[in-house]
Amino acid sequence: MDISFSPIDLTAQPTLVLGVLEERTLTPSAEAADQATDGAIGRAMAAGRFTGKKDQTLALAAPAGLDVDRIVLLGLGAPAKLDAQAAQEAGGALAPALNALGATRAAVALDHLDGCPLEPAQLAANLVCGARLRAYRFDKYRTKEKDDDKPTMVALTAMCADPKAAEADHAPLAAIAAGVEFTRDLVSEPANVVYPESFAEQVEGLASLGVDVEILGEAAMRKLGMGALLSVGDGSVRESKLAVMRWNGAPDADAAPVAFVGKGVTFDTGGISLKPAGGMEEMKYDMAGAGCVAGLMKALAGRKARVNVVGVLGLVENMPSGGATRPGDVVTSMSGQTIEVINTDAEGRLVLSDALHYTRTRFKPQFMVDLATLTGAVVVSLGTYQAGLFCNDDDLAERIMGAGQSVGEEAWRMPLGKRYDRDINSEIADMKNVGKGREAGSITAAQFLKRFVGETKWAHLDIAGMAWCKKETALVPQGAAGFGVRMLDRLVADHYEG
């Protein structure tokens, strides 16, 4: 969808979108259009249930008095609550409504609103960003789709008093949206297209934005002693990779970076502990944590974030074969700690254990956040509404949760503790890769990771319930969600940029 900005012109596009506040209160542009159409807007609202509540829409076809094909009324709710997130969600409501009408080009008028925390330019920038996020569609492999099923919108113009200011406000939002789309593209691809080597090649493309990219193969990782990560890929013909990305945007080039680590299991059969066949196709998105970190790096570099950032991706494919790791095998991690592999389907923590230790010892970051579709247990606990957050630092936890709330990507803090830690002690090695039975599965997984972070501030986000959206939400269509990119971008922007 092409996005542009212009001064307010009520005949700029064949579809005119006008904001309406709660209790059917017309914005200035809507009031002008109502007068030009001899009260058609007011009559249409009076005849139906449209009251201007947040995200409501109402279409009026070919109203006399204005040279447009249709008017779409967009509910904005209470102006005092119309912050950046609410404005993006309004755009998210608008995008499918326009496609449902068969509109191809539309212009939305955004006025100054008393009591609104946003200026019209900010309102315009956020609304079109929300429309872009909601309009995302992965249709690369659709070859016989009917025209009636295809989206129609090709251009959206945001009209306000200062379009140049809107363009400036939109630029960083566009970079963030591009990062989300990059994540969604990676997660949507099938595993025969995105596997460790091809994922690494996608990451190398970030060099065009100024990201330094280094790819380690199995020989380099074996030399470093990454026996835990490498054990996961032993059964696959695909070579495991470690992708290291660095963005140096801080005024002080030597400032300690912030670090993000992603689980990148490009397909997870469970290995020798084979998963059931039903639903296994979904395991193409077991690399969503790595996808998020890649998208975050694209977003931060795209908006020229004033911070030093490291992103590390552990990229493997977990397959059964004669060379695969067996239940009962003992592997040695890069940290020197030994792990008894009880279940080869608990592989993500093995990948992250070496990736976290590598990140901590090489880069000495201010903090590390890892993201992983790590456990089904977190979905049982929190469903598909919040990610599970585990953290060894209260301030970092509060900052992550606050960032998530501000962008609509929420996380709920879960406990850590020595009682859970005892559940992963092994009789023959330093630890097991799973706890006792099915109890507290997401917590024991986090306790496992905690053994590899030392004294570094660290947070673990279990995004198993958030990576794939089965029912569309305000800014997320069905499919790959891109969860975490906007949350962590906000975390960096609010607390760590120079």
Image: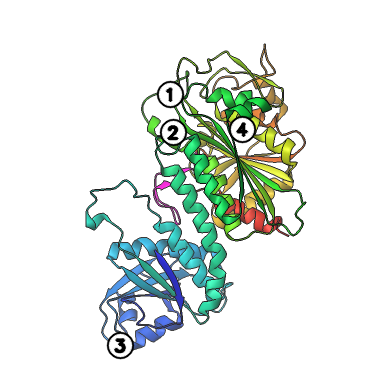
Mark closer to the chain start, 3 or 4: 3
Q: Looking at this view, is 114 or 343 the one in front? A: 343
Q: Amino acid at mark 1?
A: Lys
Q: Position of residue 51 (x, y in %)?
A: 39, 71
Would you name the residue on which mark 4 appears? 352
Disc on res. 38: 3
Disc on res. 275: 1
Would you name the residue on which mark 2 appears? 283
Which residue is depicted at the point 70% across and 56% down?
495
Task: Check whether the beta carbons of the residues at disc 1 and disc 2 lie within 8 A of each other.
Answer: yes
Mark closer to the chain start, 2 or 4: 2
Q: Is residue 470 magenta?
A: yes
Q: Quadrant of residue 453?
A: top right
Structural crowding at the residue carrying mark 2, measured as other residues with C-alpha within 10 Å and reported as few (<14), some (14–19) or many (≥20)? some
Structural crowding at the residue carrying mark 3, measured as other residues with C-alpha within 10 Å and reported as few (<14), some (14–19) or many (≥20)? few
Mark closer to the chain start, 1 or 2: 1
| 4 or 1: mark nearer the eye | 4
Cα distance between the residues tagged 4 and 1:
21 Å
Q: Amino acid at mark 3?
A: Asp
Q: Amino acid at mark 2?
A: Met
Which residue is depicted at the point 63% across and 23% down?
227
Q: Which quadrant is home to the N terminus?
A: bottom left
Q: Is residue 119 magenta?
A: no
Q: Which residues are magenta?
A: 465-480
Q: Looking at this view, is 209 or 295 the one in front? A: 209
Task: Check whether the beta carbons of the residues at disc 3 and disc 1 lie within 8 A of each other.
Answer: no
Q: Position of residue 426 (x, y in %)?
A: 66, 15
Mark closer to the chain start, 3 or 2: 3
Say whether residue 39 is left or right of residue 455.
Answer: left
| 3 or 2: mark nearer the eye | 2
Mark closer to the chain start, 3 or 1: 3
Which residue is depicted at the point 70% across and 22% down?
337
